Image (cartoon, rainbow, N blue to C red):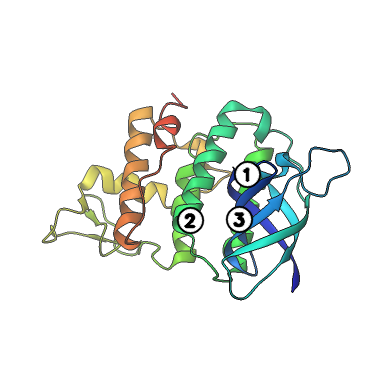
Protein backbone atom coordinates (compact mmCIF):
# COMPACT_ATOMS: atom_id res chain seq x y z
CA UNK A 1 0.00 0.00 0.00
CA UNK A 2 1.34 3.44 -0.91
CA UNK A 3 1.50 5.83 2.06
CA UNK A 4 2.39 9.50 1.97
CA UNK A 5 4.30 10.71 5.01
CA UNK A 6 6.67 13.42 6.10
CA UNK A 7 9.99 12.26 7.52
CA UNK A 8 13.18 13.38 9.22
CA UNK A 9 16.26 11.51 7.99
CA UNK A 10 18.31 9.96 10.81
CA UNK A 11 20.82 7.84 8.92
CA UNK A 12 21.52 6.55 5.42
CA UNK A 13 24.09 4.36 3.73
CA UNK A 14 24.74 2.97 0.28
CA UNK A 15 23.32 -0.46 -0.56
CA UNK A 16 24.70 -1.90 -3.78
CA UNK A 17 25.48 0.29 -6.78
CA UNK A 18 22.39 2.46 -6.97
CA UNK A 19 20.39 2.04 -3.77
CA UNK A 20 20.42 3.43 -0.26
CA UNK A 21 19.00 2.29 3.06
CA UNK A 22 17.40 5.25 4.83
CA UNK A 23 16.42 5.30 8.50
CA UNK A 24 13.78 7.94 9.25
CA UNK A 25 11.49 9.34 11.92
CA UNK A 26 7.91 9.87 10.78
CA UNK A 27 4.78 11.22 12.53
CA UNK A 28 2.56 8.33 11.44
CA UNK A 29 4.80 5.25 11.57
CA UNK A 30 7.46 6.28 14.08
CA UNK A 31 10.93 5.05 13.20
CA UNK A 32 11.10 3.19 9.93
CA UNK A 33 13.67 2.03 7.39
CA UNK A 34 13.32 2.22 3.63
CA UNK A 35 15.26 1.17 0.59
CA UNK A 36 15.57 3.87 -2.05
CA UNK A 37 16.74 3.52 -5.65
CA UNK A 38 18.88 6.64 -6.06
CA UNK A 39 19.13 8.26 -9.46
CA UNK A 40 22.15 10.19 -10.74
CA UNK A 41 20.18 11.83 -13.53
CA UNK A 42 18.42 15.20 -13.29
CA UNK A 43 14.93 13.75 -13.58
CA UNK A 44 15.12 11.05 -10.91
CA UNK A 45 12.59 11.05 -8.07
CA UNK A 46 15.18 10.07 -5.44
CA UNK A 47 18.54 11.80 -5.07
CA UNK A 48 21.39 11.07 -2.68
CA UNK A 49 21.45 14.62 -1.34
CA UNK A 50 17.93 14.20 0.04
CA UNK A 51 19.18 11.82 2.70
CA UNK A 52 21.52 14.00 4.76
CA UNK A 53 21.14 13.98 8.59
CA UNK A 54 17.97 15.78 9.74
CA UNK A 55 16.71 16.48 6.20
CA UNK A 56 12.95 17.02 6.36
CA UNK A 57 11.22 15.22 3.50
CA UNK A 58 7.83 14.51 2.06
CA UNK A 59 7.84 10.90 0.90
CA UNK A 60 5.74 8.23 -0.77
CA UNK A 61 6.38 4.79 0.73
CA UNK A 62 5.29 1.35 -0.45
CA UNK A 63 4.38 -0.18 2.93
CA UNK A 64 4.46 -3.96 3.29
CA UNK A 65 3.06 -5.52 6.46
CA UNK A 66 5.48 -8.47 6.55
CA UNK A 67 8.72 -6.57 6.23
CA UNK A 68 10.59 -3.93 8.24
CA UNK A 69 12.33 -2.59 5.14
CA UNK A 70 9.84 -0.69 3.02
CA UNK A 71 10.36 0.80 -0.44
CA UNK A 72 10.57 4.53 -0.97
CA UNK A 73 8.96 5.47 -4.27
CA UNK A 74 9.21 9.25 -4.17
CA UNK A 75 10.74 11.97 -2.02
CA UNK A 76 11.22 15.70 -2.06
CA UNK A 77 12.76 18.22 0.31
CA UNK A 78 9.91 19.64 2.35
CA UNK A 79 11.96 22.17 4.33
CA UNK A 80 15.00 23.51 2.43
CA UNK A 81 17.84 24.33 4.83
CA UNK A 82 19.44 27.76 4.81
CA UNK A 83 22.47 27.06 7.00
CA UNK A 84 22.84 23.54 8.44
CA UNK A 85 24.62 21.98 5.40
CA UNK A 86 26.95 24.98 5.06
CA UNK A 87 27.95 25.62 8.70
CA UNK A 88 30.43 23.05 10.07
CA UNK A 89 29.29 23.61 13.67
CA UNK A 90 25.62 23.20 12.79
CA UNK A 91 26.31 20.21 10.57
CA UNK A 92 28.21 18.42 13.35
CA UNK A 93 25.44 19.28 15.81
CA UNK A 94 22.89 17.89 13.33
CA UNK A 95 24.85 14.66 12.96
CA UNK A 96 24.93 14.19 16.74
CA UNK A 97 21.21 15.01 17.02
CA UNK A 98 20.34 12.52 14.29
CA UNK A 99 22.39 9.77 15.96
CA UNK A 100 20.80 10.55 19.31
CA UNK A 101 17.31 10.31 17.80
CA UNK A 102 18.17 7.01 16.16
CA UNK A 103 19.23 5.65 19.55
CA UNK A 104 16.32 7.08 21.53
CA UNK A 105 13.29 6.52 19.27
CA UNK A 106 11.56 3.21 18.77
CA UNK A 107 10.31 1.54 15.62
CA UNK A 108 6.72 1.57 14.46
CA UNK A 109 5.36 3.78 17.23
CA UNK A 110 3.26 6.64 15.91
CA UNK A 111 4.04 9.87 17.77
CA UNK A 112 3.06 13.10 16.09
CA UNK A 113 4.07 15.24 19.09
CA UNK A 114 7.64 13.87 19.10
CA UNK A 115 7.89 14.46 15.38
CA UNK A 116 6.56 18.01 15.69
CA UNK A 117 9.02 18.81 18.48
CA UNK A 118 11.87 17.36 16.42
CA UNK A 119 10.92 19.30 13.30
CA UNK A 120 10.49 22.58 15.17
CA UNK A 121 13.88 22.09 16.84
CA UNK A 122 15.57 21.45 13.50
CA UNK A 123 13.94 24.54 12.01
CA UNK A 124 15.13 26.60 14.97
CA UNK A 125 18.73 25.35 14.60
CA UNK A 126 18.73 26.08 10.88
CA UNK A 127 17.42 29.61 11.41
CA UNK A 128 19.56 30.47 14.44
CA UNK A 129 22.01 33.31 13.84
CA UNK A 130 23.43 33.50 17.37
CA UNK A 131 24.96 31.17 19.95
CA UNK A 132 23.60 27.60 19.77
CA UNK A 133 26.28 25.79 21.81
CA UNK A 134 23.65 24.52 24.28
CA UNK A 135 21.21 23.34 21.60
CA UNK A 136 21.84 19.62 22.13
CA UNK A 137 21.44 19.96 25.91
CA UNK A 138 18.04 21.62 25.58
CA UNK A 139 16.95 19.23 22.82
CA UNK A 140 17.77 16.10 24.84
CA UNK A 141 16.33 17.32 28.15
CA UNK A 142 13.08 18.54 26.56
CA UNK A 143 12.75 15.30 24.63
CA UNK A 144 12.38 13.38 27.92
CA UNK A 145 8.87 14.86 28.16
CA UNK A 146 7.83 12.81 25.14
CA UNK A 147 9.51 9.66 26.41
CA UNK A 148 7.83 9.83 29.81
CA UNK A 149 10.73 10.49 32.17
CA UNK A 150 11.01 14.28 32.40
CA UNK A 151 12.45 15.13 35.83
CA UNK A 152 10.27 16.33 38.67
CA UNK A 153 11.34 19.90 39.50
CA UNK A 154 9.02 20.47 42.46
CA UNK A 155 11.41 19.74 45.30
CA UNK A 156 14.50 21.67 44.33
CA UNK A 157 16.12 23.66 47.13
CA UNK A 158 19.68 25.00 47.22
CA UNK A 159 22.05 22.33 48.46
CA UNK A 160 19.93 19.35 47.43
CA UNK A 161 21.01 16.51 45.15
CA UNK A 162 19.52 15.11 41.94
CA UNK A 163 18.64 11.41 41.84
CA UNK A 164 19.07 10.25 38.24
CA UNK A 165 17.15 7.03 38.85
CA UNK A 166 14.16 8.58 40.61
CA UNK A 167 14.29 11.62 38.27
CA UNK A 168 13.85 14.08 41.09
CA UNK A 169 15.69 16.34 43.51
CA UNK A 170 16.31 15.03 47.01
CA UNK A 171 17.86 16.19 50.27
CA UNK A 172 19.17 12.78 51.38
CA UNK A 173 21.79 10.69 49.64
CA UNK A 174 20.09 7.72 47.89
CA UNK A 175 21.36 4.16 48.24
CA UNK A 176 23.10 4.18 44.86
CA UNK A 177 25.73 6.21 43.02
CA UNK A 178 23.54 7.62 40.20
CA UNK A 179 23.14 10.91 41.99
CA UNK A 180 24.42 14.41 41.28
CA UNK A 181 26.05 16.43 44.09
CA UNK A 182 24.60 19.83 45.03
CA UNK A 183 26.66 21.93 42.59
CA UNK A 184 25.73 19.73 39.62
CA UNK A 185 22.11 19.49 40.81
CA UNK A 186 21.96 23.30 40.75
CA UNK A 187 23.25 23.28 37.17
CA UNK A 188 20.64 20.65 36.25
CA UNK A 189 17.91 22.81 37.77
CA UNK A 190 19.01 25.69 35.54
CA UNK A 191 19.30 23.45 32.47
CA UNK A 192 15.77 22.14 32.87
CA UNK A 193 14.49 25.71 32.67
CA UNK A 194 16.37 26.59 29.48
CA UNK A 195 14.71 26.89 26.11
CA UNK A 196 16.07 27.72 22.66
CA UNK A 197 15.49 31.50 22.77
CA UNK A 198 17.06 31.91 26.23
CA UNK A 199 19.79 29.26 26.31
CA UNK A 200 22.48 31.68 25.10
CA UNK A 201 22.09 33.55 28.39
CA UNK A 202 23.41 30.55 30.34
CA UNK A 203 27.18 30.53 30.03
CA UNK A 204 29.08 27.26 30.33
CA UNK A 205 32.70 26.37 29.84
CA UNK A 206 33.47 23.56 27.41
CA UNK A 207 34.25 21.29 30.38
CA UNK A 208 30.93 22.09 32.07
CA UNK A 209 28.96 21.60 28.85
CA UNK A 210 30.65 18.29 28.06
CA UNK A 211 30.12 17.00 31.58
CA UNK A 212 26.45 18.00 31.42
CA UNK A 213 26.16 16.15 28.09
CA UNK A 214 27.58 13.02 29.75
CA UNK A 215 25.11 13.36 32.63
CA UNK A 216 22.13 13.63 30.27
CA UNK A 217 23.28 10.62 28.27
CA UNK A 218 23.72 8.66 31.51
CA UNK A 219 20.15 9.66 32.40
CA UNK A 220 18.97 8.17 29.10
CA UNK A 221 20.98 4.99 29.71
CA UNK A 222 19.22 4.55 33.05
CA UNK A 223 15.71 5.13 31.72
CA UNK A 224 16.19 3.48 28.31
CA UNK A 225 17.89 0.09 28.79
CA UNK A 226 20.13 -0.68 25.83
CA UNK A 227 20.76 2.98 24.95
CA UNK A 228 24.03 2.81 22.99
CA UNK A 229 27.24 4.82 23.10
CA UNK A 230 27.06 7.60 20.50
CA UNK A 231 29.94 7.62 18.03
CA UNK A 232 29.57 11.32 17.19
CA UNK A 233 29.95 12.41 20.82
CA UNK A 234 33.76 13.00 20.72
CA UNK A 235 33.33 15.35 17.75
CA UNK A 236 30.52 17.26 19.48
CA UNK A 237 32.69 17.77 22.55
CA UNK A 238 35.32 19.58 20.50
CA UNK A 239 32.95 22.02 18.80
CA UNK A 240 32.44 24.88 21.25
CA UNK A 241 34.78 26.76 23.56
SS under mark 3: strand
Q: Residue at x 74, y 35 (%)?
A: 82
Q: Mark 2 or mark 3, which has the lower sequence index?
A: 3
- Quick one: 53 or 84, which is closer to the camera? 53
The residue sitting at the right extreme is 43
Q: Position of residue 153 (x, y in %)?
A: 35, 61
Task: Please give the residue where the numbered disc 2 appears in the rendered image.
Answer: 142
Task: Please give the residue where the numbered disc 3 appears in the rendered image.
Answer: 24
Q: Position of residue 104 (x, y in %)?
A: 45, 57
Classed neighbour count for the residue bearing mark 2: other residues with Cα under 10 Å, few (<14), some (14–19), many (≥20): some
Q: Residue at x 10, y 61 (%)?
A: 175
Measure how far apart labels 2 and 3 are at the Cα level.
Answer: 20 Å
SS under mark 1: loop
The answer to whether any part of residue 84 appears in the image is yes
Measure how far apart labels 1 and 3 are at the Cα level.
Answer: 20 Å
- Quick one: 173 or 234, which is closer to the camera? 234
Q: Position of residue 145 (x, y in %)?
A: 47, 63
**Disc number lying in front (2 or 3):** 3
How many marks are shown on the rendered structure?
A: 3
Q: Mark 1 or mark 3, which has the lower sequence index?
A: 1
Q: Quadrant of residue 7?
A: bottom right
Quadrant location of the C terminus? top left
**Disc number lying in front (1 or 2):** 1
The answer to whether any part of residue 193 appears in the image is no
Eyeballing the image, is 64 above or below 115?
below
Q: Mark 1 or mark 2, which has the lower sequence index?
A: 1
Q: Residue at x 65, y 72 (%)?
A: 64
- Quick one: 128 or 98, which is closer to the camera? 98
Q: Position of residue 151 (x, y in %)?
A: 36, 61
Quadrant location of the N terminus? bottom right
Task: Please give the residue where the numbered disc 1 appears in the rendered image.
Answer: 16
Amino acid sequence: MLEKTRAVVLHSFRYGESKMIVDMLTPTFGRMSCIAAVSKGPHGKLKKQYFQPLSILETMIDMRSRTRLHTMKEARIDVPFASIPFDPLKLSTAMFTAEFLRAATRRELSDELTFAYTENSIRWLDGCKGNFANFHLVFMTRMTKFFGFYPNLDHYVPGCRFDLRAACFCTDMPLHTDCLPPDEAARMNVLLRMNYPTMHLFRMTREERNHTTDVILRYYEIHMPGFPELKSLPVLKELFV
